[in-house]
Image: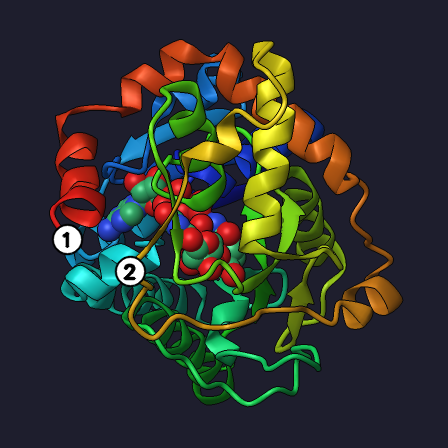
Amino acid sequence: MEKIILVTGGAGFIGSHLVRRFVNRYPDYSIVNLDKLTYAGNLLNLKDIEQKKNYSFIKGDITDSAFIDELFGRYCFDAVIHLAAESHVDRSIDGPMPFINTNITGTVNLLNAARSRWTGIQEDKLFLHISTDEVYGSLGDRGLFTEETAYDPRSPYSASKASSDHMVMAWHHTYKLPVIISNCSNNYGPNQFPEKLIPLVINNIRANRNIPVYGKGENIRDWIYVEDHAAAIDVIFHKGKTGETYNVGGNNEWRNIDLVKLICTITDKKLGRKPGSSEKLITFVKDRAGHDLRYAIDNSKITGKLGWKPSVSFEKGLEKTVNWYLENDRWMQGVLTGDYKSYYRKQYLDR
Ligand code: NAD
Ligand code: DAU
């Protein structure tokens, strides 16, 4: 094998798309997927590649420093692509501690292990940290997040991710660990846990349940198809410069209410329902605490310097996404467990 790569969080939404891409495109790379399998991790996401020779799965927790150290002793990793995280803003508002533990302490455990195993042999090594545009805070009506935008996180989730980014850069500047950070905007596509807006809306339409829109639905997000994000990570991994940060975004801003209406239209058509029938399910609910108004990425650094650009139009991507959720009922029913039902009740019904 040319390289042994540790991917953390590979059973999650973005991680599973990234693992599939690397396993299929790079038969000479051995991909070791480390995942705790929290509520968000799902091995069904990787069913199609689990038998591949260059893929292996290890169940484990990045907050367990002894385990991480032992793992880095067992394998001579050439690179780490770190995605494992607690990722949902609403859950972080309800209970910040898992975010502090996994996103900050877990990241530092990985940095420490990489540092101690790579001492003196750092040249061809890479620690690629997958982060979010939420570290930059909230934009007004105008402007874009660039790599120079000052960090200004507002939620426990984004503060924990910002903190992890600072740790990654601290390990680079202090210990010369070869690192890169990518900060991406909102992903959508197959295999996303239905706590996030797009799969939640599709699932509620399918079940004829109210569609909860926070506040007035005026908040804006910049959406990117998950496979475009995986392609960006691939390009950064192979062509990115150590010590740098790359913003990744879809140049695709949508007001939540407009997006929800578009999903209603596409889903009604697919389900053969009367046009306009699902829009009646839209319900404006209490706003998210500290709800960031707008995110939007300036992706000119990655497009100009590394030659990546988003390739999936929103029209195509959203249609593929709606189709996938409606056609993969086994996947959906598998994640709509008792845990999900109690989360849903607490988040939407008992307020
Ligand atoms: P996700 O919640 O779908 O998946 C997270 C994965 O991490 C799960 O498989 C989970 O089991 C695993 N995990 C959680 N805690 C762990 C622990 N302690 N040890 C080992 N594994 C653990 O998240 P996602 O949406 O796929 O996001 C992946 C990464 O990308 C995160 O770091 C997130 O901050 C970042 N990101 C996400 C988006 C987005 O729109 N979803 C955008 C930009 C960046
Ligand atoms: O920007 C990148 C980030 O995007 C990632 O770092 C996060 O991991 C990811 O979860 C996502 O964060 P958001 O908070 O933007 O995503 P979410 O899908 O939770 O919400 C999108 C928008 O929709 C946001 O403005 C809140 C709103 N919303 C969300 C839910 C779940 C609703 O109006 N109703 C809802 O029920």
**Residue at the spot x=54%, y=43% of the render?**
260
Instruction: Count all numbered tags in the image, as a single digit.
Output: 2
Q: Is mark 1 within 8 Å of ligand 2?
A: no
Query: Could you tell me the amino acid type at mark 2?
Result: Lys
Query: Could you classify mark 1 by the number of other residues whose Cα lies within 10 Å: few (under 14), some (14-19), or many (20 or more)?
Result: few
Q: Quadrant of ligand 2?
A: bottom left
Residue 351: mark in rendering: 1
- State the separation of the CA atoms marked 2 and 1: 8 Å
Left or right: residue 222 compared with residue 158: right
Can residue 215 be seen here? The reply is: yes
Q: Earlier in the sequence, mark 2 or mark 1?
A: 2
Secondary structure beneath disc 2?
loop
Left or right: residue 112 compared with residue 67: right
Whether residue 88 is situated above or below residue 159 in the rendered picture: above
Camera-side residue: 67 or 291? 291
Assign the N terminus to one quadrant of the image: top right
For residue 39, what is the image quadrant?
A: top left
The residue to which callout 2 is attached is 286
Residue 329 at x, y percent in the picture: 41, 11
**Residue at the spot x=62%, y=49% of the render?**
258
**Residue at the spot x=22%, y=68% of the render?**
100
Residue 320 at x, y percent in the picture: 66, 25
Residue 278 at x, y percent in the picture: 50, 28
Asked whether disc 2 touches disc 1, contact meaning CB atoms under 8 Å apart, the reply is: yes
Q: Is mark 2 within 8 Å of ligand 2?
A: no
